Amino acid sequence: MAAEPLFERLCLIGVGLIGSSIARAARAKGGIARSIVAHTRRPETLARVRALDFADAVEADPARAVAGCDGVILCIPVGAYAGVMHQIAPHLAPGCILSDAGSTKGSVVRDLQPLLPPGVHLVPAHPMAGTEHSGPDAGFAELFEGRYTILTPLPGGDPAAVEKVAELWRRLGSTVERMDPDTHDKVVAIVSHLPHLIAFTICGTADDLAEETREAVLKFAASGFRDFTRIAASDVDMWRDIFLNNREALLEMLARFTEDAHALGRAVRWGQAEFIEDRIRRGRRIRRELIEHKQA
Ligand code: NAP
């Protein structure tokens, strides 16, 4: 028998890959919400969300969407949080839990906390699950299964609200971890944001090559380059916002990476086989560990 729903009326602000996956998983698994309200801003997306029929109500106005809800999850690019929060804050019901799925966490606390009405509990969250696809068609109910979701609860925040959000993600299939926002932002800078920066850059470098070389690159793309193009196919707004909202941590990781890349380049120049082998072995070990942790 399905558990009692955690929320009476859960509002998803943004129903692209992440928001629509939450809605689909909530329907498929039960025990999440008695009803789901979806808000999206563009008329094309609204029409698509209505056609896909994964929410009980679809609302074009964010203020109307959150009215009467006991849970609200922002699933929009992190750069849009402050603007949307200005619109919804006066309409959040006392006791409501406000959470999110954004890929940066320091900026989320910075943008949401000052506008938080009294009696509304903010519990930031980040599901470490995704694909390079976006929009309401891209979501699927199994997206969060076996993946980590990181919560960055506020100091002094309501423990019951934090536990409710943790339980939400467990029911969606995730394993929940807690962290402070700074640690979260550093971790995701190395495991996600820097790899995307490298992927966007390597595709740009290939694109800058002379015409005949570029064609050969596309024609003979080995798996290495192909994997980078998959990562680089990600959503423009989302990644612009992530880079701009995790600036310090990303720049720190980029500086460390650049140093290490120069060191490997130097070993190549001077024929230091042992150094090169050591780096390759480290890469192989990390891959093995990832597989052992069931994250590959
Ligand atoms: P997505 O598929 O591109 O969907 C974004 C949604 O946000 C759409 O419903 C879009 O609606 C809406 N939106 C975009 N700009 C907006 C704005 N300025 N104001 C209001 N609504 C806006 O994105 P997603 O992949 O679901 O990502 C959503 C959030 O989850 C982001 O914060 C992202 O960092 C985080 N996240 C993503 C992944 C991933 O791999 N994709 C993983 C973990 C966390 P319209 O079409 O109506 O504009």
Image (cartoon, rainbow, N blue to C red):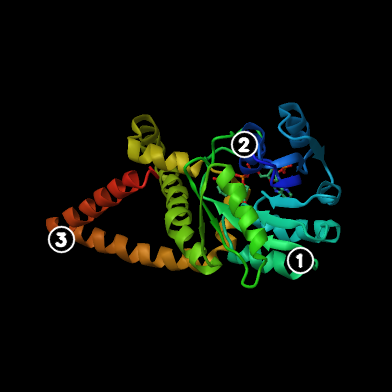
**Residue that numbered label 3 is attached to:** 270
Q: Earlier in the sequence, mark 2 or mark 1?
A: 2
Counting from the top left corner in percent of width and height, residue 102 is at 61, 54
User: Which disc is residue 274 wearing?
Assistant: none
Residue 256 left/right relative to 233: left
Cβ–Cβ under 8 Å for marks 2 and 3: no
User: Which disc is residue 116 wearing?
Assistant: 1
Q: Quadrant of residue 89?
A: bottom right
Secondary-structure class at tag 3: loop
As measured in the structure, the alpha-carbon distance from the residue carrying label 2 to the one carrying label 1 is: 28 Å
Closer to the eye: label 2 or 3: 2
**Residue that numbered label 2 is attached to:** 25
Q: Residue at x 62, y 52 (%)?
A: 101
Locate the C terminus by quadrant.
top left
Q: Earlier in the sequence, mark 2 or mark 3?
A: 2
As measured in the structure, the alpha-carbon distance from the residue carrying label 2 to the one carrying label 3 is: 54 Å
Q: Quadrant of residue 134?
A: top right
Callout 3 crowding tier (Cα within 10 Å): few <14, some 14–19, many ≥20: few
The amino acid pointed to by label 3 is Trp
Q: Cβ of disc 1 within 8 Å of ligand 1?
A: no
Residue 239 visible in the current orientation = yes
Residue 267 left/right relative to 94: left
The amino acid pointed to by label 1 is Leu
The amino acid pointed to by label 2 is Ala
Secondary-structure class at tag 2: helix
